[in-house]
Image (cartoon, grey):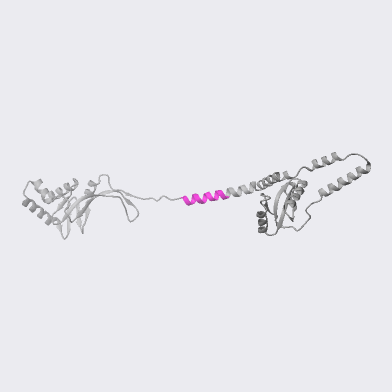
């Protein structure tokens, strides 16, 4: 008789209806979602038998009536005898299904396999390592390395190109000396010897004055405000004349530069801040002023 009742409970659970045990509670199958175990593993979704003291399923007594084709009193008697054998000290044992104690139900392994035909798997969760920080550091390192390489390989060429560009822009202010000399020679008439000698002396004097540095040697400074770089001393001196005509009391200086060029500085100081201030003050006249560090 006990096995027959256990089989009825088994079939009621398998059918998904659940079973209500009078004066005990209800058993039913519930689908539980995946959950993370204490050791970090992931338990896959599964079906479990759940107990509740509430009536949430058809009564076992009514099921006995329907299957045994007997009256309710006889079915109740069968149920009471079954309960006396299976429910003791708050522990209910249903053969082939499982055991209920302390409000929880432990499913029999065989029954657990029946209600979970696909099986229950325990998965190991592996965290994906993030290499974002490594990529960022590598990217910065590559950029820095490229910047250093460009500076080492092309630094001098870039500086030279800047100088040439400034020279090309600035040299336009100075007409060729050869043209002036040719014009002067065309105006000289070969008349008398004394006139020729006087003309020669005047020409020599003019040439001496032209080749004489306009900027007298003065104190050497660590920093200079540069207005331009010129390929010939004549063009550099002409630029000095132009600067002195535009800026009152300016102290110009012609300094040697790379490649045999001539750098015209219109201000000098051992303090770079003074040079920067001077350059800002006169960029309305010379927009391309820049500060040169002689050290």
Q: Residue visible at 62% across and 49% down?
A: 151
Q: How many marks?
A: 0
Residue 243, position as x, y percentages in the image: 73, 51
**Quadrant of image for the C terminus:** bottom right
Residue 105, position as x, y percentages in the image: 21, 55
Which residue is outermost to the right? 193
Q: Residue visible at 55% across and 50% down?
A: 141
Q: Residue visible at 20% across and 52% down?
A: 98
Residue in front for this viewpoint, 28 or 235: 235
Residue in front for this viewpoint, 243 or 274: 243
In reply to whether residue 15 is colored magenta, the answer given is no
Residue in front for this viewpoint, 283 or 32: 283
The overriding secondary structure of the stretch rendered in magenta is: helix
For residue 51, what is the image quadrant? bottom left
Magenta stretch: give its range: 131-144
Residue 32, position as x, y percentages in the image: 26, 50
Residue 269, position as x, y percentages in the image: 70, 58
Q: In this view, does 249 lie above or below 113?
A: below
């Amino acid at each position: 008789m006990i096995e027959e009742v256990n089989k009825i409970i088994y079939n009621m659970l398998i059918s998904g209806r659940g079973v209500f045990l009078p004066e005990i509670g209800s058993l039913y199958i519930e689908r539980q979602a995946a959950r993370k175990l204490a050791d970090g593993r992931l338990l896959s979704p599964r079906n479990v038998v759940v107990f509740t003291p509430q009536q949430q399923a058809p009564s076992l007594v009514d099921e006995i009536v329907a299957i045994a084709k007997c009256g309710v009193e006889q079915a109740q008697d069968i149920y009471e005898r079954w309960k006396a054998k299976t429910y003791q000290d708050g522990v209910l044992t249903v053969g082939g299904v499982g055991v209920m104690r302390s409000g929880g139900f432990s499913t029999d392994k065989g029954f657990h396999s029946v209600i979970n035909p696909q099986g229950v798997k325990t998965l190991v969760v592996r965290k994906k390592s993030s290499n974002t920080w490594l990529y960022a550091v590598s990217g910065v390192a590559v950029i820095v390395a490229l910047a250093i390489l460009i500076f080492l390989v092309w630094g001098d060429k870039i500086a030279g190109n800047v100088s040439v560009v400034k020279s090309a822009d600035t040299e336009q202010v100075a007409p060729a000396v050869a043209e002036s000399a040719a014009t002067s020679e065309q105006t000289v008439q070969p008349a008398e010897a004394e006139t020729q000698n006087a003309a020669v002396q005047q020409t020599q004097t003019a040439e001496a004055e032209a080749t004489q540095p306009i900027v007298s040697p003065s104190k050497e400074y660590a920093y200079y405000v540069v207005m331009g770089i010129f390929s010939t001393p004549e063009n550099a001196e002409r630029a000095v004349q132009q600067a002195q005509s535009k800026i009152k009391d300016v102290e110009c200086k012609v300094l040697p530069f790379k490649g045999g060029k001539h750098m015209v500085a219109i201000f000098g100081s051992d303090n770079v801040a003074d040079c920067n201030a001077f350059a800002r003050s006169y960029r309305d006249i010379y927009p391309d002023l820049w500060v040169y560090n002689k050290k």
